[in-house]
Amino acid sequence: MKLLLIALNREMHPYPVQPIGLAYIAETTRRAGHEVVFLDMNLCSDPLEFLEQTVADFAPDVIGFCLRNIDNCAFPNLEFYLPWAKEVVTRCRNISPAKLVIGGSGFAVMPKEILAYLDLGVGVLGEGERSFLALLETWRGNGASPLDRIAGLALREGAIYRETPPEWLAFGKQDFFPARDLLDLSSYLRGGSLTAVQTKRGCPFRCTYCTYPMIEGRTLRMRSSAHVAQELEHLQQAYGVEEIFFTDNVFNNPVRHALEICQEIVRRGIKISWTGFFNPALMTEELADWAVRSGCVGIEFGTEGGTTTSLRALRKGFGIKTLIRSHHIAQSAGLNVCHYLIVGCPGETLSTVREGLDLIASLQPTAVIVSTGIRIYPRTGIAKVAKSEGYDTKNLLIPQFYFPPAMREDPGGMITAISKEYPRFRFEGFHSRPTLKLLEALRRRGHRGPTWQLQSLLGELKDPTQGQTKK
Ligand code: B12
Ligand code: SF4
């Protein structure tokens, strides 16, 4: 069949993110004999014009949309991306008789609401390779399964909505890489993008607020270190890639797998710099040592809380002692460390917020990124807590942020005041456009690496409030 695959994302912050999920779908479908055209709206100056031309020239049988982001999860400077998605879907419906289907990580988080919002009938839940192929077979009329027998679909017919449970792939056995030849990788690299590589899927943890298990499932499925290293070599040789972001929800789970990847990079003499998300519960000296040797330029700890109250409320599965120990292990090994934090967990008060931020400040990390309020997603623990505390959680598509009772009256004012005490911390959603412009200027001057490293450089350049800071 003729497939037009459209990456809808146009968010440029913190840098343009390569649509590797859709590139996996493209590789799987062309291997199965489908004809694929890839339209990446991130890189089009006039995406709707380009869309019309592509549809007219290619006349697709199926159009598949990749919805990566619903919104930027940032209180209070919220960006909501669905009106844009709706414009594209509506345009496709008007100009083409093709069958329409949607997938992507953003879609998997709220499939029912998104199908209704976009007036679509079929979506693929999370990991899409196998379900999408099965769907295409059915649409081609090859005597294949009816839609409600295909695993991992969201189906909407009028007011009736159904889901078929996903069957998670043996991802580690998949022997190919995403179709990066269909991406304009050089434009991404010029824009400061770190190239995305996924070493595993799934997360068995149960943090209160998290949506990742809905997208990837709870069962860990890991690629071999040799296959990951081959991908890195391929990226270097074919595209001159020098910087990688491991997109795993937790790179260091399990530690053994992370260690094997680092060791394989060193064994093969691959010279590449990399970063990724780490869980503080799982840091070891051996891993930190091999991370440095294999080119890790910094780690991003999904710390989220700096007090026992917040860590317990978020069900992070580690305590303050472990957090401090893991931080020191990473720092002593010579790694840059960035902590991600959430302010506004259940049970928090102004005093526990300060206690947590003070603790993190005392560790002297390279950077700290603070989210304020917790974006409430359906099917998460925080949705239950929010409902029990009186939030209207019926339709969460229009973003709502949870704040504990002690912060609910004027969370914006409270955070604005607190953020002045921690000028080197980045409060997501409170940054101004000029800061983003400065970041872009640094990129243009050739500064590379994760954006928080640039941010800390910006902090040093500005050094705005000497004498008033807690650091
Ligand atoms: C790694 C990551 C990042 C990294 C990306 C690094 C990089 N260089 O790529 C960083 C830290 C930069 C980042 C930033 C942001 N992120 Co982020 N990120 C992720 C994460 C953990 C993995 C994404 C990924 O690459 N997965 C690997 C690929 C292979 O999987 P995939 O894209 O899901 O694709 C599969 C399926 O979805 C499906 N599929 C995909 N497309 C299609 C299309 C069709 C037709 C079909 C059938 C199937 C299909 O099949 C694919 C293969 O199985 C996800 C959470 C998660 N676990 O998914 C959040 C996530 C995507 N991020 C999210 C958000 C919000 C953001 C930010 C807006 C946050 C911010 N305020 O800065 C920015 C936006 C950046 C941008 N420019 O778009 C949200 C999006 C949902 C939402 N609430 O809107 C997610 C889901 C996390 C969450 N909160 O729930 N992110
Ligand atoms: S926050 Fe991280 S560790 Fe917790 S469930 Fe989500 S992906 Fe897993």
Image: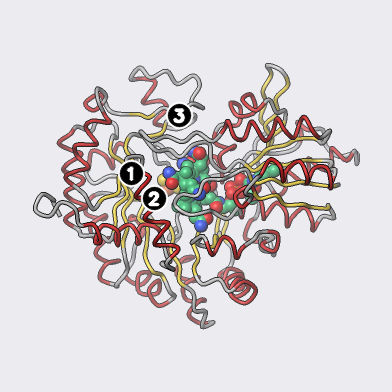
Question: In the rendered structure, which amino acid carries the disc numbered 2?
Answer: Leu
Q: Which residue is mark 2?
A: 436
- Which secondary structure, mark 1? loop
Question: In the rendered structure, which amino acid carries the disc numbered 1?
Answer: His
Query: In the rendering, which numbered label is found on residue 152?
Result: none
In the image, residue 277 lies at what x, y percent? 42, 56
Which residue is pictured at 35% across the width and 29% down the height?
402
Which residue is pictured at 41% across the width and 32% down the height?
381
Label 1 to label 2: alpha-carbon separation: 8 Å
Q: Which residue is mark 1?
A: 431
Label 3 to label 2: alpha-carbon separation: 23 Å
In the image, residue 301 lies at what x, y percent? 35, 55
Q: Residue furthest right?
A: 142
Q: Are marks 1 and 2 in contact (CB under 8 Å)?
A: yes
Q: Is residue 331 above or below residue 59?
A: below
Q: Which residue is mark 3?
A: 399
On whether ligand 1 comes within 8 Å of the CB at mark 3, the answer is: yes
Q: How many marks?
A: 3
Q: Is residue 221 above or below residue 224?
A: above
Q: Is residue 333 above or below residue 145?
A: below
Q: Quadrant of the C terminus?
A: bottom left
Residue 249 appearing in the image: no
In the image, residue 392 lies at what x, y percent? 42, 18
Tell me which corner region of the image, top left, top right, bottom left or bottom right, holds residue 334.
bottom left
Question: In the rendered structure, which amino acid carries the disc numbered 3?
Answer: Pro
Disc 3 crowd rating (10 Å Cα; few below 14, some 14-19, many 20+) is some
